[in-house]
Image (cartoon, grey):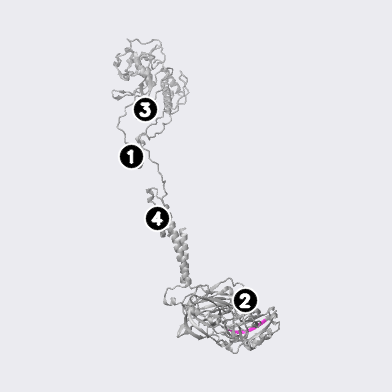
Amino acid sequence: MLLLLLRRVGLITALAAQCVNSSPAALTVTPSVQWYGDDGDWSAVSIRIGTPPQWVDVMVSTVSSETWIVGKGGCPSTPSDCNNMRGGLFTPGSSTSWQPQGFFELGVDKHLGNTGYAEYGFDNLTFGTTGVSLANAIVGAFNYTGTINSTQYLLGFFGLGIVPGSFNNTKVPSAISALLEKEDAIPSHSYGYTAGARYQDKGVLNSLTLGGYDANRLVPHDTSFTLNPSQNPEVYINSISVTNTGISSSLAYSSDRVSAVIDSSTPYLWLPKATCERFATALGLIYDESLNLYTFPTNSSQHETLQTSNITFAFSLSDISASPATVVITLPYAAFDLKLTFPAIPGTVSGAANATKYYFPLRQAASDAQYTIGRVFLQEAYLITDYERGNFSVHQAVHNSYQNTNIVAITRPSTSTFSGPETSQKGGTKLSTGAIVGVSIAIVAVVVLLIFIGICLYRRRKKRTIVDDEKATTAPTRSLFGRLRRRKEPLPHEASGDTSYPTEVGADATHERFELPAPIGPVELDSEYGTLDGTTENGSSTQDSNKLSAYERERRKLEHQQIAAAHAQRELDTYHPEKTENDVSSMPHYRPSDSLREIPDVESPLVSPVGPESGGSLTISNGAPSPVSPGFTSAPVSPMTAAPPTYTPIASTNVVYAGRLPPNVVLPPVVPKFVGPDGRTMSDESGSGSGSGSGLGSDPISSTLGSGFTDRESDDLYGATTRAPLSPVSPSGPAYALTGLDDGPVAPEEEGRYIPNARADAQVQEILAPWGSRRRLDGEDIVHVPQPAANRFSWEEERTQGTD
């Protein structure tokens, strides 16, 4: 939008510059709306004279170079409407700008018998409502009134000539010359004029254009004539013909050709006497000696007959030079149907019956000098005069488009000998009135647009807010003129980021979050109890379960059950694992403050996985799988967690007794130290640690249970006596005592010798609680991982070989 406004400013400026640098436009003089004349109805122009301006209406003179107006003595006491009849009176004494020059004779149309004197002076002349004013114009105020036969002027005149006046040895240019040379208000020394016609379309006003012409008021052609030495339009009248209902007759022959000046100061046609007689014969006119005019006979209907006829007159005109080109102008009879009124008829008074008379505007010329084509002809002719080119043209006038104008300026030729504007000759910079108006409009428009742009920029800057410091790196604001410059390639800009950022949560225990534990693998379903064939271990296992012993399969199944129970309990736990330092972001701007990252220097003691409880039951403190399990993963222990939950002890019915060892099974040479119920190492009173036993423990190489076992241990664990499944906890007595189904309780005196039963109890606890061996023993952590033999029973070997 800003760019569009600036373009408009540039357009207005360009138009203003055009007004300054180009030639001024032609000036159309305002016509009066009143019709004047005691010798017909004529259209006048309105001008203003003096300071303050005094309105007067004057006729147009194509031969005069002066401005004449009726003075204050132009109207006697009667008639009362004399002021209006004469187009208004001018009082020189009422104008503060009047510069009197004295009384001088009126110098126009003397050859036509016009005489008189006027008070001349210089004063301001304004052309109607156009606003164009001319200072120190020649003005002559006349008061004399006379009879019609002396061609006395009823109204004043505005002269279109270019002959300068001379007053007291001072030359003063004419109005047209002054408008161009002093005011630069018109483009050239030229004009276009038609007198108007009251009989056409209820009255068509005159058209006067200075420095050009109105193209809508004429029929164009390319024939032009040469001005006479007096710079007046003069033509040859080659012929005049009259036509009535298709019948044409000549009123002037080629042999009668005369040259006549086109002069709008007089309303008549001044022609040779022979030509005038032909007019009278053709139209039934008589010549009135008292009036020196052609009129109609008294008590005759000839006038009414001519009014109702379709008579037309055709004037064939040519140049006074040798050019053979001709122009024909046609006039209807209505153009010549005029009427004399008071004071044109001598001896009459205003309003009397004899004060009006119809006449035909034709006069007999006494000499060649009086041949004149008057204003009556210009009712139907449009005259264009170009003084700088020394020619003029006569066109047929058009009346049906007088309300619409098409003003065409006549520019000065490069070879003109006439003076141009004084500002151009002196190299000055004075502007014409039109240029000043154009520049003023442009300046006002520019100021208004600049104020509007300033308001828009102020509002935009006021509404602009900076969200954060990162927006300071964006492209700087360009100036007003910088925005106007077009860039060949658009510059890349970084997209705006989010204006709000999440706050980093502190790394302390109150804000830490941890991932949920990974899902545990599928839990095996219980196989058929007491059999070696199961749907899982003997089915499609991925760990070669066919090579596992029944003992190992039962042990693994128990571990899976423990894991499933621990997982179910963990889902009920409302405590969340803490976040470790490894989970803290390594990005500097996302790290918590140093105070939040401080970790208290507290040594975290190991938590016993097995805790004694009342009733001698075992408490599982951690639901992690056994370290010997293939999927074992040590989970981190949070120092902030509460006491581990308590789980329900395993029922004795779920303990599986694998049976006694076969005779060919050899115990391993190394057996772990005996561990009592309190977790401490117990002494071997039976001396089994010496390795001197008998039976199964005598062969340290072939033994599969280790060298720390004695024969009694072998008998106790794999004796021939049929035993029920071992219970990890005895219903009564010490927690390490084991009870057989057939032997009954062990005697107290034999209690020391049955330490292996306590060891066997510990091994059962190891099966039920794989974390039970993770106790702190003498400052060191010892984990016993039993390594079972590949084949513990002969039938296992046979079964394995059978499946391979």
- Mark 3–mark 1 Cα distance, whole angstroms, equals 27 Å
Of callouts 3 and 1, the N-terminal one: 1
Q: Is 697 situated left or right of 522 in this image?
A: left
Q: Which mark is residue 593?
A: 1
Q: Which residue is mark 4?
A: 477
Relative vertical location of residue 604 with respect to residue 206 in this rendering, above or below: above
As helix, strand or loop, the secondary structure at mark 4 comes to: loop
How busy is the neighbourhood of tag 2: few (under 14 within 10 Å), some, or many (20 plus)?
some
Q: Which residues are magenta?
A: 235-242
Q: Earlier in the sequence, mark 4 or mark 3?
A: 4
The outermost residue toward the front is 77
Name the residue carrying label 3: 642
Point out residue 698 in the picture as x, y percentages from the top left corner: 32, 15
Q: Nearer the viewer, mark 2 or mark 3?
A: 2
Residue pictured at 37% horizontal, 26% vertical: 643
Quadrant of the drawing holding the C terminus: top left
Q: Residues within 10 Å of mark 4 (few under 14, many from 20)?
A: few
State which mark lies toward you, 2 or 4: 2
What residue type is disc 4 on?
A: Thr
Q: Which comes sooner in the sequence, label 4 or label 1? A: 4
Label 1 neighbourhood size at 10 Å, few (<14), some (14-19), many (20+)? few
Q: What residue is pinned by disc 2?
A: 198
Q: Position of residue 738 (x, y in %)?
A: 37, 14
Q: Residues within 10 Å of mark 3 (few under 14, many from 20)?
A: few
Query: Could you tell whether 709 is left or right of 39 in the image?
Result: left
Q: Nearer the viewer, residue 700 or 246?
A: 246
Name which residue type carries label 3.
Ala
